Image (cartoon, helix red, strand yellow):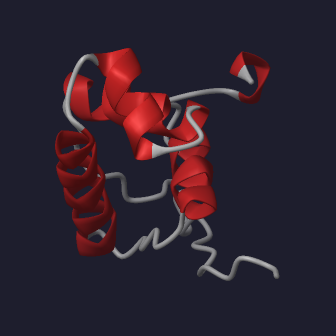
């Protein structure tokens, strides 16, 4: 099955609207993207899986608020790349 999510292209100025993520939100996002499960990410980050879920939900809400919804893990990975929270060389 193919993941479907909207692709938001840069506007005339070339910039994508980016939400403001805290340093911890970026840590949790990248940790979760690297992990197979929220439980695995939680163990690596020394937090509970529920806290990972809370962070991911807030991150998704922030992206939706700027018109760049990310409803799947792959969509969040794309957003993290677009906003320089991670780079392909890191993977």
Q: Quadrant of the N terminus?
A: bottom right
x%, y% of residue 63? 33, 63
- Position of residue 26 measured from the top left corner of the image (x, y, whole percent): 34, 31
Count of picture labels: 0
Residue at image coords 59%, 81%: 6
Q: Is residue 45 visible?
A: yes
Rendering coords of residue 74 (x, y %) = 63, 59
Observer-nearest of 13 and 66: 66
Quarter of the C terminus within the rendering? top right
Q: Position of residue 81 (x, y in %)?
A: 60, 40
Task: Using the image, determine if residue 46 lies above or below residue 71.
Answer: above
**Location of residue 14 with respect to 41 vertically, above or below:** below
Left-right relation of 85 to 24: right
User: In the image, what residue occupies the spot 41% across and 44% down?
Assistant: 38
User: Which residue corresponds to the image point at 46% horizontal and 38% vertical from the top-left?
Assistant: 32
Q: Confirm whether residue 14 shows in the render.
A: no
């Amino acid at each position: 099955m193919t993941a479907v999510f909207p692709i938001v292209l840069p506007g005339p100025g070339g910039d994508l609207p980016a939400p403001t993520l805290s340093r911890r939100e970026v840590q949790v996002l990248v940790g979760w993207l690297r992990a197979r499960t929220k439980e695995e990410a939680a163990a690596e980050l020394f937090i509970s899986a529920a806290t990972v879920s809370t962070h991911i939900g807030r991150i998704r809400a922030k992206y939706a608020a700027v018109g760049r919804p990310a409803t799947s893990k792959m969509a969040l990975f794309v957003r993290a790349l677009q906003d320089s929270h991670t780079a392909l060389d890191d993977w």
